[in-house]
Amino acid sequence: MLNVAVPQLPGANQPFHFSHILTREFKFMKPDPEPLIHIASDWDLKPHEIAIVGDSADDIECGLNAGAITILLKNDVNTKLVDKAHYSISRLDDIINLI
């Protein structure tokens, strides 16, 4: 497990730590659902209990293939994916409104 501390998040009581970072050394790559299934399993969750946030077709397809909630971070080149993702946002902090 790789923990990376990042600056204090607004409203949080402690620094945020990434508990899972999968690199290209992981056997499976998006859009294969296995990366999300692997993380969900490690967290004792079902894939439909997690969300993937991404800005590419592979990100959204990976989430859909795993049965996860998909959140598209919109940009100038991925607007065609808006209808494929469960949700779409313009800024990462827009996720707060989805919770």
Image (spheres, rainbow, N blue to C red):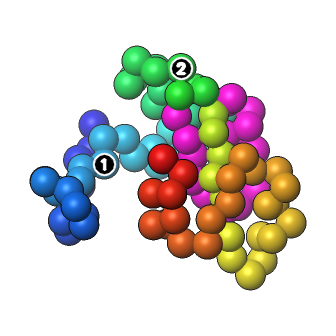
Q: Amino acid at mark 1?
A: Phe
Residue farthest toward the bottom in the current orientation of the protein: 76
Q: Dot 1 lies on which element?
A: loop
Residue pictured at 58% horizontal, 26% vertical:
47
Q: Which mark is residue 18?
A: 1
Depth check, front residue: 43 or 1: 43
User: Residue 61 bears which disc, if any?
Assistant: none
For the residues carrying marks 2 and 1, which lies nearer the camera in this image?
A: 2
**What segment carries the magenta color?**
50-67
Closest to the observer, 68 or 32: 68
- Write the residue at 74% across / 81% down: 76
What is the three-letter code of the residue carrying label 2? Answer: Lys
Residue 28 image point, x, y percent = 61, 35
Q: Position of residue 71 (x, y in %)?
A: 63, 52
The crowding category of the residue bearing disc 2, from other C-alpha atoms within 10 Å (few below 14, some 14 to 19, many at least 20), is: some
Do we see residue 74 in this rendering?
A: yes
Which residue was labeled with disc 2?
Answer: 46
Q: Is residue 65 magenta?
A: yes
Q: Give how far across and how far down residue 92 sits, in percent.
A: 49, 66
Question: From the viewer's perspective, is 25 left or right of 75?
Answer: left
